[in-house]
Amino acid sequence: MSGRFIAIVGPSGVGKDSVMQALAARDPRLGLARRVITRPGDAGGEEFDGVTEAAFEAQETAGVFALSWRAHGLCYAIPATVDAVLAAGRDVMGNLSRSVLIAAQARFARIEVIALSADHATLAARLVRRGRETDAEITRRLERATFTLPQGVKAHVVENNGVLDDCVAAILTHLYPGAMACNTGTDK
Ligand SMILES: Nc1ncnc2c1ncn2[C@@H]1O[C@H](COP(=O)(O)OP(=O)(O)OP(=O)(O)O)[C@@H](O)[C@H]1O
Ligand SMILES: O=P(O)(O)OC[C@H]1O[C@H](OP(=O)(O)O)[C@H](O)[C@@H]1O
């Protein structure tokens, strides 16, 4: 059976990248899709392929992306190379925009949507502490926090207000019910 594409979604600052990195470190069954983004490659945060807008559009036209979308003035994509990993039966996580979920459900034969949530004050404090965006950009990101999931999207909602490990454990239990999560790291 093919693997599942695990879409990790939620407002900016909710912890999508942190949770995905922790999941990948905790459980070798979970791969991580490396995104293509029109953001300077040294911006920090997740590992991604930074490209110019012209290069992005050329790759998009050439069909090398499984999914692509625009948000926060940037272009984002999940490369179609994930198909080979899924075909080999491996689950792969990807950080997606909530706006691309209908397309994602159509694109992948098996998909799980994990919607992370955190309260507004927590999101704001995290974005300021992370310091990747300007104050104005942070304000715009927080305004988008209430974006609702498109109708027809079936998501499993997991809170990430508290300890990251609790959120990670809840996701592993949902993805692999009844099975012991493989723990290759150390519990904190
Ligand atoms: N459970 C947590 N407790 C404390 N800090 C956290 C937790 N989860 C994430 N953070 C911190 O919050 C900040 C935002 O997390 P992260 O970049 O993973 O969010 P994101 O959802 O991927 O955001 P964006 O969509 O803007 O990329 C980071 O600095 C991260 O270290
Ligand atoms: O608000 P929505 O549309 O759900 O998410 C929009 C985009 O915001 C985040 O981008 P980044 O990782 O902060 O650059 C997400 O990863 C997504 O690509």
Image (cartoon, rainbow, N blue to C red):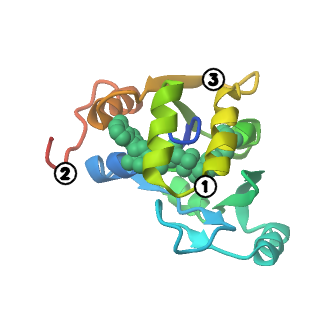
Residue 166's disc is: none
Q: Earlier in the sequence, mark 1 or mark 3?
A: 1
Q: Earlier in the sequence, mark 3 or mark 2?
A: 3
- Judged from this view, the residue extending furthest toward the right is 61
Q: Is residue 55 left or right of residue 91?
A: right
| Residue that carries the numbered disc 3 in the rendered image | 154
Mark 3 touching mark 2, by CB under 8 A? no
Report how far apart the C-alphas of labels 1 and 3 lie in the structure. Answer: 33 Å
Report how far apart the C-alphas of labels 1 and 2 lie in the structure. Answer: 37 Å
Q: Is residue 126 left or right of residue 50?
A: left
Amino acid at the residue labelled 1: Thr
**Relative vertical location of residue 29 with respect to residue 60 in this rendering, above or below:** above
Q: Position of residue 92 (x, y in %)?
A: 49, 51
Amino acid at the residue labelled 2: Thr
**Is disc 2 placed on a helix, strand or loop?**
loop
Question: Depth-wise, is mark 1 or mark 3 nearer the camera?
Answer: 1
Mark 1 crowd level (few <14, some 14–19, many ≥20, 10 Å Cα): few
**Is disc 3 placed on a helix, strand or loop?**
loop
Q: Is residue 109 left or right of residue 75?
A: left
Q: Which of the image's four quarters has the C terminus?
A: top left
Query: Which one is in front, 25 or 52?
Result: 52
**Is disc 1 placed on a helix, strand or loop?**
loop
| Residue that carries the numbered disc 1 in the rendered image | 134
Residue at image point 29% right, 29% down: 166
Residue at image point 53% right, 58% down: 132
Looking at the rendering, the quadrant in which ligand 1 lies is top left
**Relative vertical location of residue 42 with respect to residue 101 in this rendering, above or below:** below
Q: Position of residue 58 (x, y in %)?
A: 82, 75
| Residue that carries the numbered disc 2 in the rendered image | 184
Amino acid at the residue labelled 3: Lys
